[in-house]
Amino acid sequence: MLAFLFRRVSLIVPTFIGVTLLAFALIHLIPGDPVENISGERGMDPARRERLLREFGLDRPLPVQYVDYVANVLKGDLGTSLTTHEPVLDEFTTLFPATVELAFFAMLLATIVGLPAGIIAALKRNTVADYAVMGVSLTGYSMPIFWWALLLILFFSVQLGWTPVSGRIAVEYDVPALTGFMLIDTLRAGDASAFRSALSHLILPSIALGTIPLAVIARMTRSAMLEVLREDYMRTARAKGLPQWRVVLVHALRNALIPVITVIGLQVGLLLSGAILTETIFSWPGVGNWLVHGVQSRDYPVVQGGILLVATIVITVNLIVDLTYGVVNPRIRHA
Amino acid sequence: MINTRSVHQNRKLLVAALLITGLAAAPAVLAKGGTLVYCSEGSPEGFQPQFFTTGTTFDAVSVPMFNRLVEFETGTTNIVPALAESWTVSADGKTYTFKLRKGVKFHSNANFKPTRDFNSDDVLFSWNRMADDNHPFHKVTAGQTFAYYDDMGMKNIVDSVQKVDDYTIRFNLKRPEAPFLADMAMDFASILSKEYFETMQKKGTPNAADVYPIGTGPFEFVSYQKDATIRYKAFDQYWGGRPKIDNLVYSITRDATARYAKLKTGECQVMAFPKPADLDEMKKDPQLNVLQKEGLNIGYIAFNVEKKPFDDKRVRQALNYATNKDAIMKAVYQGNGQVAKNPIPPILWSYNNSVKDYPYDPAKAKELLTQAGFPNGFEVELWYLPVTRPYNPDGKRMAEMIQADWEKVGVKTKLTTYEWAEYRKRSKGGEHTVVMFGWSGDNGDPDNFFVPLLGCEAVKGGGNSARWCNKAFEDLIIKAAQTPKQADRAKLYEQAQVIVKEEAPWITVAHSIRFDPVRKEVKGYKMDATAHHYFDKTEVQPSPQ
């Protein structure tokens, strides 16, 4: 187990180097620069331009900038935003809870609906229920998020008036951000109507963001279940006279869960990238929204730092997933 | 130029929105008591009026919370008294003396309670902080620059500022500069509280004064949740009279379709920057009022006169004749603009209405091209705008129409574009031959169009994308800037416009109309000439249900 952990963790080092290099290269590859972004249609005196580039540290050769950046990162300094002049890490930690809250609910929705849907489809293989689940999930999987999100807004918010259009909470509630998680903060403030408002603001973005993972989970559960249901020990279990629910949930599902957990783990990366689109459309004040704006304004430190932090989270979650296999299925426990 | 956020739209998004919004019948949600919610287009970069240059930041900072010595009357570019009650200009045009208003109160917050009213120390402080590199508060916020002060070239205009007494302040200029008064009405010239900065310095956090704003404006800062909401409350002691609404909330909504949806459901009462494609439907909505105003802007095509064949005036004129502007107006602006014949819009004083535009006349164009030695035309690259701008809703469509027009006189046009920042950078470097561009005025002074766009100095900085430097024109605009009386200046600018038309460094294409959609219950909201959003005179009246 320890050897596995060590192997697994040592792999992280090259991954991090890759991530910093990639983030650095990509943002510098985008045309334009932060100084040009300041001036708009107005011309800029070449001397002033050079002065600003110097102030931003962008007049040095790229390799020097990169090495300098990595050195600062190792010291825990992700730099300051070129637009707001706030430390990147502070901005990230302010906004990240909003993204986590959204991603958590999207994942919750995807799992709560996806798992049973997959199980049902597998048990009722080649029936209408199966076709329905598979058809709907294929549609969900193929849906572009921004289009789906707009569709949800226009139908549920504008047409039916059931849910708010965008934002995290109605403007009449000014809840102090203690944890940054709106649901927790409203509960701590003891304001039930604010809590309901925050919850209602979560519905549409969670659906928009959760749809693709939901489809993936449903399809993965179905195929994993089908495989397991064919196993000899399933027949044995039934032959022993175990009740159907026990056969399905304990004998089949537990074994089928391994690939499903892998997929759920992988979805975290997908969720964070999906959050970029979802947050932009729903004016959700999270890191996705922030990164988009960082790219638009060529805020190099924000983009580099944001990508690095998000990558760290994805890597960590994947590591945890790898370690969970053993818990779920003793056969893969690492010696 | 206020750097309004570019509205680069995703086409699919637009189509989807068009398809669906047609079905909508919005449920009316009443606004809470005296609260007005404004769906703004983005987050402010910070809460300090001197550091930043975007209209988004000004809308959230200098407009609600600060005042200038003089200001623009909302809806016009007339300069009216604000923190200065009156002013005098010396005969040589080099000394401006402002008499300050008495009894003006500053806001307060948890860390600061003002002990005195606004006076000339605050003006001196606000200005010298930007102007003097050695001022103790010049560098309290690391990495910040006084961008607009620099952009406007203030270092070359103002020599010194002098406190005459507590309520009199004098600006000594290096040269006569008639647009100076209009400059003083701009956002970067907002007045800060000296006492506040000194208090924060004593507490050991001088830069906190740049983060938590204290001004004299109609609204006080309450809170900001990053990228989500900004809250203000009415300032009871506002010298201009307490605002009619109690609370002002900016609901930051970057997506134009979402802003429109929020306006429909009543989640906000006023929205910023509607998508041009949504306007027709908005106008039909009985719950909305779509206000409109002629924009203080110009969309144009610039010929790089440093490159052949555009060093020849006849070629530039020929392509002016060859372009069918009326058709562009219909197809691109869809009625939301007017054909431009001058570089400045007709709402600006000194607009020369007697200038005769080049009519659409391909035969005449052909004739001029033949004279210039191009009987069979030539090949040229036209750069078109990659984004929607306030002065041009669809650069690509415009370029395609021009391409078809020029084809008829034998000029083969290749259409090119770049990512927006790259586009600006390259064109400022003079890489283009023919480029599509535009401008939105900062301060309603004609100088703010002629100098940054067509002046000889602006060739260096790249704002003059025709790279056209004409002695006669330059002399006129310099003289106009140094002439104190507006009527005299207007005559000089009128002559300058004649030269621009004759020399044809540009095709002046259009002045666009701007729109602010508001809900019916919003009363007393007036559109501003420089595209800011003012709510100090606005009311929200719940509509009878």
Image (spheres, rainbow, N blue to C red):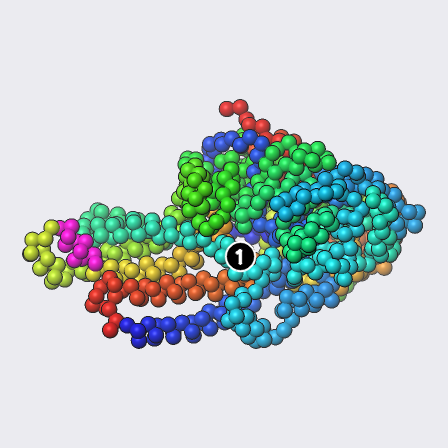
* Magenta stretch in the rendered image: A244-254
Query: Residue A258 magenta-drawn?
Result: no
Disc 1: CA contacts within 10 A as few (<14), some (14-19) or many (>=20): some
Q: Quadrant of the N terminus of chain A?
A: bottom left
Q: Position of residue B537 (x, y in %)?
A: 67, 33
Residue in the picture at 39% in, 65% down = A316
Q: Position of residue A136 (x, y in %)?
A: 30, 49
Q: Position of residue B2 (x, y in %)?
A: 68, 51
Q: Name the amino acid, label 1.
A: Glu
Residue B28 appears in the picture as rendered? yes
Q: Between residues B224 and A63, which one lies in front from this camera angle?
A: B224
Q: Where on the picture, by quarter, is residue A259?
A: bottom left
Residue A147 appears in the picture as rendered? no
Q: Position of residue B95 (x, y in %)?
A: 88, 50
Query: Residue A247 magenta-drawn?
Result: yes
Residue in the picture at 64% in, 41% down = B220
**Which residue of the protein is positioned furthest toward the front in this rendering?**
B202
Secondary structure that dominates the magenta span: helix
Report whether B55 appears left or right of A249: right
Q: Where on the picture, by quarter, is residue B293?
A: top right
Residue in the picture at 23% in, 68% down = A332
Report whether B341 appears left or right of B416: right
- What residue is disc 1 on? A91
Report whether B260 appears left or right of B216: left
Q: Disc 1 sits on a residue from what chain?
A: A
Q: Is residue B488 above or below residue B244?
A: below
Residue in the picture at 44% in, 38% down = A191
